């Protein structure tokens, strides 16, 4: 339960558990969770239901116009929901267990929202995972004579696979969207680094980060996974167990890469 992924012999500890702080965190967790559920049921779920109805009316074929319509409807809400999830987990949940365990290191994230490069965002937004990847993946690659670029590619590849696993197992389907989204960060890293060198001190890279990540990427991922999940139920309504044969997973993966 300790809010860290990296092992060391001794961590800094606080002298005691502060009950009032624990109660304050729990109250905020309830409020944030309630607001998140409100957004899901009042905005996201109705729009996704309407999306499926439009798809059914179109004969099960989705078009760019349908995707663009619902993408615009979900963009702002998705940004708020993602920020709520971030605040709930990294600021409240991790601090709650840190307080209960008297865990002294409370730096779980830094100011990623000011990132002028995409690489800075990935270094700052999730420090427990970042420290684990650096210690157990990036540095071992460098010690085995990988270049820094190659080591970075390995880290993103591993992260892309894990993102897809996290989505695929609960929904019992293998799709490429999370994997492609993570691997698509590598070109953005290069672009934002170039922009930062070309326009030092400007907010161009920060704007590109927000647009690509919270405005474009996540809402589109929600739409695509919703379509694929319900498409699978319509074509196999009885057996929804995870079809884990290599042939079936490969077929479904590449099938999803095509606009039906």
Image (spheres, rainbow, N blue to C red):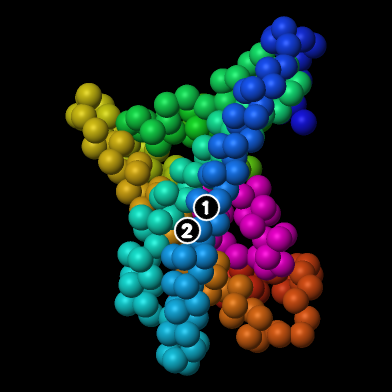
Q: Position of residue 128 (x, y in %)?
A: 63, 28
Residue 32 is at least partly visible in this image: yes
- The residue drawn where x is 50% and y is 51% is 35
Camera-side residue of 130 and 87: 87
Give the quarter of the image for residue 131.
top right
203 up-or-down from 169: above or below: above
Q: Position of residue 9 (x, y in %)?
A: 79, 11
- The residue drawn where x is 39% and y is 44% is 187
Residue extent of the magenta highlight:
160-184
Q: Give the Cα distance between marks 1 and 2.
A: 5 Å
In the image, taking residue 46 as reference, residue 175 lies left or right, namely: right
171 up-or-down from 116: above or below: below
What is the count of numbered marks? 2
* Image quarter of the N terminus: top right
**Which residue lies under the disc numbered 2?**
39
Camera-side residue of 147 and 221: 221
Residue 162 shown in magenta: yes
- The residue drawn where x is 40% and y is 62% is 74
**Which residue lies under the disc numbered 1?**
36
Residue 250 shown in magenta: no
- The overriding secondary structure of the stretch rendered in magenta is helix
């Amino acid at each position: 339960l300790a809010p860290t992924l990296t092992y060391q012999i001794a961590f800094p500890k606080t002298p005691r558990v502060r009950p009032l702080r624990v109660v304050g965190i729990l109250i905020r967790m309830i409020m944030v969770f309630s607001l998140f559920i409100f957004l899901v049921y009042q905005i996201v779920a109705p729009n996704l239901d309407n999306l499926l109805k439009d798809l059914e009316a179109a004969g099960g074929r989705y078009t760019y116009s349908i995707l663009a319509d619902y993408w615009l409807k979900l963009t702002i809400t998705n940004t708020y929901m993602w920020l709520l999830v971030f605040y709930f987990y990294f600021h409240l949940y991790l601090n709650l267990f840190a307080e209960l365990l008297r865990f002294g290191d409370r730096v779980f994230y830094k100011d990623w929202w000011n990132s002028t490069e995409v690489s800075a965002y990935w270094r700052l937004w999730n420090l427990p995972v970042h420290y684990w990847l650096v210690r157990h993946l990036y540095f071992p690659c460098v010690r085995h004579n990988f270049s820094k670029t190659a080591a970075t590619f390995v880290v993103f590849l591993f992260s892309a696979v894990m993102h897809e696993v996290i989505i695929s197992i609960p929904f019992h389907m293998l799709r490429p969207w999370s994997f492609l989204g993570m691997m698509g960060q590598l070109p953005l890293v290069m672009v934002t680094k170039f922009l930062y060198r070309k326009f030092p001190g400007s907010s161009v890279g920060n704007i590109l980060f927000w647009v690509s990540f919270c405005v474009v990427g996540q809402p589109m991922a929600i739409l695509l996974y919703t379509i694929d999940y319900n498409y699978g139920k319509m074509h196999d309504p009885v057996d929804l167990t995870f079809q884990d044969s290599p042939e079936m997973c490969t077929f479904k993966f590449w099938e999803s890469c095509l606009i039906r």
